[in-house]
């Protein structure tokens, strides 16, 4: 979003919940980016590993991108989190545009890409973080949760804050250290006279107004208290740009639980934020009323939530209803983007894109071959050589015969056999067990299996005469066996129908709507792990809304059988 002088900036922050999924939703990365009509677009939860940064997810015409990916090998956190910043610019070289960064950094400790620090890697710490343990900083920076871009007039932090359950002490400590360390970095920059923007998914709803039906002690949470301590109203140095522009707006949420149908009733939280701190770009003079200039009043035109990106559209309610789940899959992220429009941002000195730009990634420039590609080429070369088979002619001279080697023939045969065995292992449906087999019993006395067939070939049984006609006694026995199998199948089918009816009758009705509940299983470790319970099947929503979940809960009589 630009005026003729290029002095209006639009910044967007969006938790995409998987960048590849959003690219697929919009059919290309360029269409996804252009849909925002923004100058700087910050994505969180890209869910990409470094080796997955291919051109279709990092390169788009007219944009420079900067990625931070998870580097940890901890179980459940590989290919997890990740952030990316896209900057729309006319040129990546010799540009004076403020949207094109003059510098970029992956992480916030200065220790992420240790290879570029040479033999002194780990000894150089960013100013303001020297009091922290080096190993702890590396651990905090290993999950791909921060990318920093310096735009001359301001420094932009794109962050994805950790999530921590109330009883997970290890992740609570990680989350606390993550934010305290970041705060030190912000304060150090502010002390140097720099302006700082912090955007992203904080995983923190700061106040009761930012959470649907917040509890009485909601604001006593240590992370909410920390967040509010950053703000000017509490003596801090930052402004919550959305709340400064919409101080009393309710029901303004950016995230909704995807497993409870909460979007249907806008039962969510505001955890995606844009914060800014620092002086106004105008001269530090007071106006006629004696009030000093500040960045929000002078430069921020608007800040709002892009609700059109929500998965649940207004028309969905008439067509779909949450009944413990949807029979259709909602397309999109479980978050909504937030944007801010910044005015009167002048150009800066001539510069080119930083070395951290995705255009310089080895896999993008084509300077790096993966082991797989090398082996593939080698295998292809070997196969082409083995396809020439030498044979002797009648005159004793060797002659080349086009074809495949014996080893290749054996390999093809082996693959065909594996494929055949795999086809036999396909899981059958439950209904197939109650249907009569379409294969008739071989009345000639030989079984339909390969084993029995081989046995009959090796030794002739006395039940067959010279012409191979069936023995009458065996034919009667086979018919009686077939009738018994039909009877068993019918009985089994009736028994299964009885079980299904019993299960349906045992499902309780919720008190609020008199509708069948849905069964859930406790997956959290503890004394109730594995226990089954019943809840209202409707989507989660405000208690005052009679159409929303009524809150019914009932334990099942028995524990679920664990696989």
Image (cartoon, rainbow, N blue to C red):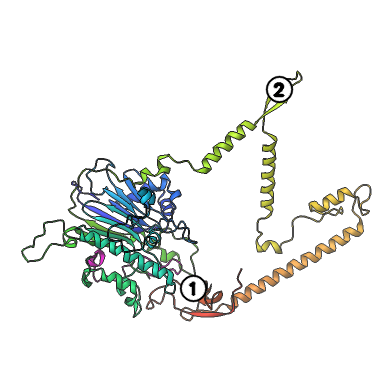
In the displayed structure image, the side of residue 238 where residue 504 appears, left or right: right
Residue under circle 1?
537
In the displayed structure image, the side of residue 27 where residue 206 appears, left or right: left
Stretch of the chain drawn in magenta:
238-265
Q: Residues within 10 Å of mark 1 (few under 14, many from 20)?
A: many
Residue 442 higher or lower than 187, as above or below:
above
The image quadrant of residue 108 is bottom left
Residue 392 higher or lower than 481, as above or below:
above
Residue placed most toward the observer, 112 or 338:
112
Residue under circle 2?
398
Q: Residues within 10 Å of mark 2 (few under 14, many from 20)?
A: few
The total of numbered circles placed on residues is 2
Residue 449 on image: x %, y %: 79, 53
What secondary structure is the stretch in magenta mostly built from?
A: loop
Residue 315 on image: x %, y %: 39, 63
Residue 361 on image: x %, y %: 39, 44
Residue 422 visible in the displayed image: yes
Residue appearing at x 49%, y 67% in the figure? 325
Residue 343 on image: x %, y %: 19, 55
Residue 31 visible in the displayed image: no
Residue placed most toward the observer, 392 or 63:
392
Residue 242 higher or lower than 18, as above or below:
below
Tell me how far mark 2 sits from mark 1, CA to CA: 78 Å
Residue appearing at x 23%, y 53% in the figure? 9
Residue appearing at x 26%, y 71% in the figure? 229
Q: Is residue 355 magenta?
A: no
């Amino acid at each position: 979003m630009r005026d003729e002088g290029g002095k209006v900036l639009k910044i967007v922050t969006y938790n995409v919940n998987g960048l590849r999924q959003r690219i697929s939703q919009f059919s290309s990365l360029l269409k996804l980016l252009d849909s925002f009509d923004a100058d700087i677009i910050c994505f969180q939860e890209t869910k990409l590993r470094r080796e997955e940064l291919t051109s279709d997810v990092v390169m788009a015409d007219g944009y420079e991108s900067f990625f931070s990916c998870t580097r940890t090998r901890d179980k459940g956190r590989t290919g997890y989190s990740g952030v990316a910043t896209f900057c729309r610019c006319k040129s990546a070289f010799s540009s004076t545009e403020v949207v094109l960064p003059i510098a970029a950094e992956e992480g916030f400790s200065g220790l992420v890409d240790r290879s570029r620090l040479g033999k002194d890697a780990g000894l150089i710490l960013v100013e303001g973080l020297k009091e922290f343990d080096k190993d702890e900083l590396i651990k905090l920076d290993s999950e791909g949760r921060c990318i920093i871009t310096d735009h001359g007039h301001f420094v932009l932090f794109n962050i994805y804050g950790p999530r921590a359950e109330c009883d997970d002490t290890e992740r609570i400590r990680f989350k606390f250290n993550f934010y305290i360390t970041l705060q030190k970095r912000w304060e150090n920059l502010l002390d140097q006279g720099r302006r700082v923007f912090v955007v992203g998914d904080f995983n923190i709803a700061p106040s009761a107004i930012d959470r649907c039906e917040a509890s009485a002690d909601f604001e006593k949470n240590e992370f909410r208290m920390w967040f509010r301590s950053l703000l000017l109203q509490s003596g801090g140095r930052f402004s919550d740009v959305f709340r400064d522009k919409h101080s009393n707006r309710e029901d303004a949420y950016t995230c909704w639980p995807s497993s409870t149908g909460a979007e249907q009733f806008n039962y969510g939280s505001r955890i995606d934020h844009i914060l800014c701190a620092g002086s106004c770009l105008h001269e530090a003079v007071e106006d006629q009323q004696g009030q000093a200039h500040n960045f929000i009043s002078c430069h921020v035109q608007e800040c709002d939530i892009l609700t059109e990106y929500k998965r649940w559209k207004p028309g969905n309610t008439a067509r779909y209803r949450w009944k413990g789940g949807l029979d259709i899959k909602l397309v999109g992220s479980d978050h909504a983007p937030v944007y801010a429009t910044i005015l009167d941002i002048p150009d800066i000195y001539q510069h080119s894109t930083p070395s951290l730009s995705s255009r310089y990634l080895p896999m993008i420039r084509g300077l790096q071959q993966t082991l797989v590609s090398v082996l593939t080429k080698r295998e292809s070369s070997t196969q082409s050589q083995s396809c020439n088979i030498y044979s002797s002619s009648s005159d004793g001279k060797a002659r080349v015969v086009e074809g495949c080697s014996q080893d290749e023939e054996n390999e093809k045969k082996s693959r065909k056999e594996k494929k055949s065995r795999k086809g036999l292992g396909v899981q059958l449906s439950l209904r197939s067990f109650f249907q009569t087999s379409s294969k008739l019993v071989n009345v000639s006395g030989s079984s339909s299996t390969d084993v029995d067939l081989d046995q009959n070939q090796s030794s002739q049984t006395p039940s067959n005469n010279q012409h191979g006609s069936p023995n009458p006694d065996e034919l009667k026995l086979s018919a009686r066996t077939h009738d018994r199998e039909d009877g068993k199948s019918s009985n089994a089918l009736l028994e299964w129908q009885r079980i299904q009816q019993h299960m349906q009758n045992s499902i309780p009705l919720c008190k609020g709507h008199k509708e069948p509940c849905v069964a859930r299983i406790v997956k959290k470790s503890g004394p109730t792990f594995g226990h089954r319970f019943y809840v209202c099947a409707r989507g989660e929503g405000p208690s005052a809304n009679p159409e929303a979940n009524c809150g019914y809960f009932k334990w099942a009589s028995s524990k679920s059988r664990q696989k």
